[in-house]
Image (cartoon, rainbow, N blue to C red):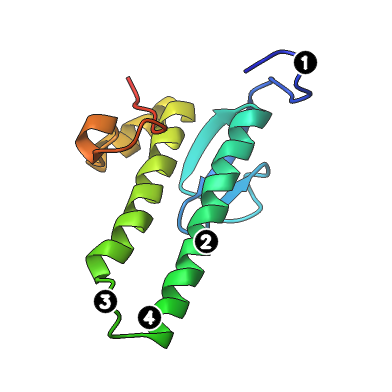
Amino acid sequence: MRQGDGLDQTRRKYYVSVQAGQILEDQGAAAYELEIMANEHEFIRLQELFEELSSMDELQTFHFAKTPFSPASDEEMNYGYDSLIVQIYRLLHEYGTESTKRHIEQMGLPLHEATMGGGAEDESIT
């Protein structure tokens, strides 16, 4: 992160619901599964992935409602969704509290780029 880009570098605690696609500042605002510590840039990055995931959900719903026998297989459609979920969990692991990191590690997700076959833009967690 470059200095002077106008984004706050202070890390704050956020409460995340992957199921709802929400990142909350207020612990009591809604149900959440995970806690993270993120700065403004990291928050925005994660929020963008949740928005992309939501858009993909809508696209898949529209696609299958309109063309249930499309040449695009369920596997092809699900790969993009699964890839986004893994990207989200990679960031949640990176930004997560110790308890969040342990929880994600126990889920058995492919948190390292090599196991998912991700592109150059994917970041692995070490």
Q: Residue at x 68, y 30 (%)?
A: 40
Q: Amino acid at mark 2?
A: Ser
Check disc 1 and report the residue beneath it. Answer: 4
Q: Which mark is residue 54?
A: 2
Q: Secondary structure at mark 2?
A: helix
Q: Amino acid at mark 4?
A: Phe
Q: Residue at x 47, y 42 (%)?
A: 34
**Which mark lies nearer to you, 3 or 1?**
3
The N terminus, quarter of image: top right
Residue sitting nearer the eye, 113 or 47: 113
Check disc 3 and report the residue beneath it. Answer: 71
Q: Which mark is residue 64?
A: 4
Q: Secondary structure at mark 4?
A: helix
Q: Quadrant of residue 87?
A: top left
CA distance separating discs 4 and 2: 16 Å
Q: Amino acid at mark 3?
A: Pro
